[in-house]
């Protein structure tokens, strides 16, 4: 496994980094006046492993998150 050291010699294993997860946008609000939402329903997005709030609706699991929690969006608009 790859490891990285800080300038002070602290060793950080690769498991210390947040592994991004992938999900599909099923709903999006309009955002704020000065911060419009830039994702669209159907887009595939990447987000941090511990981002959002998990909820269950009619037996399906969903994540509610703020737009700043999405690290990259629009990576695959066709799926």
Image: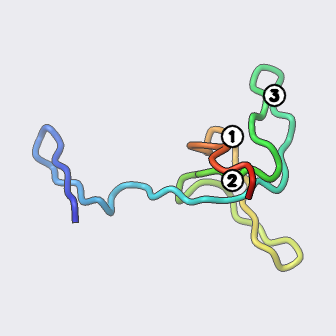
Q: Which is in the foreground here, disc 2 or disc 1?
A: 2
Element carrying mark 1: helix
Taking 19 as reference, is 77 left or right? Answer: right
Q: Residue at x 79, y 72 (%)?
A: 56
Q: Residue at x 77, y 34 (%)?
A: 37
Residue with the mark numbered 3: 32
Front residue of this view, candidates 78 and 41: 78
Element carrying mark 3: strand
Task: Give the quarter of the image for residue 40.
Answer: top right
Residue with the mark numbered 2: 44
Give coordinates of residue 36: x percent, y percent: 79, 28
Q: Quadrant of the N terminus?
A: bottom left
Residue with the mark numbered 1: 67
Does the CB distance between marks 2 and 3 fall below 8 Å? no
| Residue at the far top in the pictured view | 34
Give the mark nearer the N terminus: 3 vs 1.
Answer: 3
């Amino acid at each position: 496994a790859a490891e990285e050291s800080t300038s002070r010699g602290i060793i950080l294993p690769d498991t210390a980094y947040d592994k991004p997860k992938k999900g599909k946008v099923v709903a999006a609000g309009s955002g704020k006046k000065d911060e419009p939402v830039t994702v669209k329903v159907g887009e595939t997005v990447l987000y941090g492993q511990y981002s959002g709030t998990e909820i269950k609706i009619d037996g399906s699991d969903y994540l509610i998150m703020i737009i700043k929690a999405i690290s990259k969006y629009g990576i695959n608009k066709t799926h």
